Image: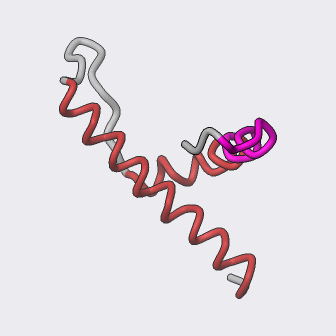
Amino acid sequence: MDPQVSPDVKQNRMTEFMKLLPLTLELAGLAKGDPARPFTADQIEGRAMTVRTAFKAARNLVKDIAENGA
């Protein structure tokens, strides 16, 4: 993240992420983990990449709906 970004912008980005989190996780479609079998580091990274991609899709969907309607 750019060190020049103000704390307000960072806070707004975090708020946006948290508001979109339910939609993001639904789009990601990740299965719940088994507490008896923790994920490996590679699995965690893969899941994080999936969540990032789903967040971008969720954000674009919301922007599209705001601009063009449902």
Name the quarter where the C terminus is drawn: bottom right
Q: Residue furthest top?
A: 36
Image position, residue 6 (x, y; %) = 76, 41
Q: Which residues are magenta?
A: 4-14
Name the quarter where the N terminus is drawn: top right
Q: Residue furthest bottom?
A: 68
**Residue 12 higher or lower than 70, as above or below:** above
Can residue 58 be found in the magenta stretch? Answer: no
Image position, residue 47 (x, y; %) = 31, 40
Q: Quadrant of residue 54?
A: bottom left
In this picture, residue 56 sits left or right of residue 16: left
Q: Residue furthest front?
A: 4
Q: Residue at x 69, y 49 (%)?
A: 16
Q: Residue at x 57, y 70 (%)?
A: 60
In this picture, residue 24 sits left or right of residue 51: right
Total marks drawn? 0
Can residue 11 be found in the magenta stretch? Answer: yes
Q: Residue at x 74, y 76 (%)?
A: 66
Q: Quadrant of residue 35?
A: top left
Image position, residue 37 (x, y; %) = 20, 16
Name the residue nearer the viewer: 23 or 45. 45
Q: Quadrant of residue 12?
A: top right
Image position, residue 36 (x, y; %) = 23, 12
Q: Residue at x 23, y 24 (%)?
A: 39
Name the residue nearer the viewer: 39 or 26. 39
The majority secondary structure of the magenta stretch comes to helix
